[in-house]
Image (cartoon, grey):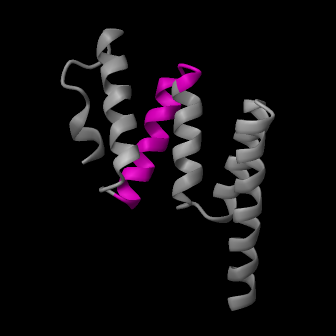
Amino acid sequence: EELVRQLRQESAELNFMLGEYYETRDRNLEYAIGYYGETLRHDDTHEKSILALSRIHLHKNELDVCEKQLTTLLRVDTGNEEGNMLMAELMMMLAAQGGRSDGGAQEYK
């Protein structure tokens, strides 16, 4: 069982590194999303992957998906500074588009 857990963790890290490569070096966001998603299939609390997916979805203006990712992250780590900053940015975008007037703060507390 320990070996399985270790292999899952190693696979998650490898997929995360591939996602980073495709996001930053190759600028292929669809591949990056695939690898980050694969990371989360092996480790559903992999914070760096959740953050990366949140940033990509925010950049692509896929606000609902971004919010779902950030909500997951902030349930795992309420003090995640980057996650909280992205959530604030997301809430401002939603409010500017006529989405929420309260900033959605209750949703991730």
Residue 69 horizontal/vertical position (percent): 49, 42
Q: Is residue 69 magenta?
A: yes
Residue 102 horizontal/vertical position (percent): 18, 24
Residue at the front extreme of this rendering: 25
Q: Is residue 77 above or below residue 71?
A: below
Q: Is residue 75 visible?
A: yes
Residue at (20% x, 18% y) in the render: 101
Q: Is residue 1 visible?
A: no
Q: Is residue 14 left or right of residue 51?
A: right
Q: Assign the magenta stretch its main secondary structure.
A: helix
Q: Is residue 53 left or right of residue 82?
A: right
Q: Is residue 39 above or below residue 98?
A: below
Residue at (55% x, 24% y) in the render: 59
Residue 87 horizontal/vertical position (percent): 36, 36
Residue 31 in which image quadrant: top right
Boundaries of the magenta span:
59-77
Nearest the viewer among 57 and 25 is 25
Q: Is residue 79 magenta?
A: no
Residue at (52% x, 45% y) in the render: 51
Q: Is residue 61 above or below residue 107?
A: above
Residue 72 horizontal/vertical position (percent): 44, 50
Residue at (68% x, 64% y) in the render: 42
Q: Is residue 60 above or below residue 9?
A: above
Quadrant occupied by the N terminus: bottom right
